Amino acid sequence: MHISLPDSRNDSILVYVKDQLVSRAKAKVSVFDSVVQGGDAVWEGLRIYNGRVFQLEAHLDRLMDSARAMGFAEVPTRESVRDALFATLKANGMRDDTHVRLTLTRGEKTTSGMDPRLNKFGSTLIVLAEWKKPVYAKSGIRLITSSVRRNTPQCLDSKIHHNNLINNILAKIQANLAGVDDAIMLDIQGFVSETNATNIFIVKRGALLTPHPDSCLPGITRAKVLQLAREAGFETIERNISITEVHSADEVFTTGTMGELSPVLDVDGRTIGTGEPGPVTVHLRDIYWDKTKTEGTPLPF
């Protein structure tokens, strides 16, 4: 059966899997790998603009912090991860319009089981680079509120950027069934956390508000937008936000490496603002886009 890809160029990509570049068809891990056995892995999403890797060091910081928090053994150095990334991009001729998923698993086990003491082979590094533009329409997206609550730090700390994404996937299924782009997830107290895939901001009377990074991932794009907003003179506030405040916001937008800044047009059937991308959102998105053209780690090829 032939299945067409979103971008046909990705049919012939080379993928880095544990020290070697292999074709897409041969890019596999063992059934004994921890990511298969229990989703036991950490990951990062990177974007390549104009021959530069945007926010590379911040992503490597989070990857290493997550691996350390998970107690991974024999973690590759930052330099070796960087080299694997560059080698993958060079082999595929990718310098722009590229998204990279870096995955670091606990590695292969000697036998099936959840005990990390069964991991004797060191970590598995995967560098999956694809031709991929931002995933959301520039005109804006629509959201619902999910009944699935975001993990609390009492159970699973979102500051670990882990591969156990069932929590998010269940919310995404609800969004799909509702015919919208994504779903807002609340924390166990009922406050807004994030969407199933992105951080969320609201604009009210000129001020920019976003949830505390407790139940939500402290996203790298989120942090960059907060920095840019402050430099641009906007008041920025991190606090608990109710879904009512989202419904009545002047503007709402989401942030993430995969989708950049995405205007939200309606939530739960309520039109946000005018139902068009708002002026604050557009202004911050333009500033962000300008930064992607000039900032980042240059590719060495």
Image: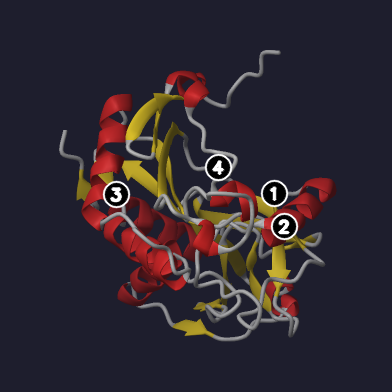
Q: Quadrant of residue 189?
A: bottom right
Q: Quadrant of residue 101?
A: top left
Q: Residues within 10 Å of mark 1 (few under 14, many from 20)?
A: some
Q: Residues within 10 Å of mark 2 (few under 14, many from 20)?
A: many
What secondary structure is found at the residue carrying circle 4? loop
Residue 95 seen anywhere in this rendered image of the structure: no
Q: Which residue is mark 4?
A: 135
Q: Which residue is mark 2?
A: 143
Where residue 245 sits: x, y (%)? 69, 79
Picture layout, residue 113 above or below residue 65: above
Q: Quadrant of residue 285?
A: bottom left
Name the outermost residue toward the left: 300
Q: Residues within 10 Å of mark 3 (few under 14, many from 20)?
A: some
Contact? badges 3 and 2 (CB < 8 Å): no
Give the CA separation, mark 1 to mark 2: 6 Å
Q: How is the image coloured?
A: secondary structure
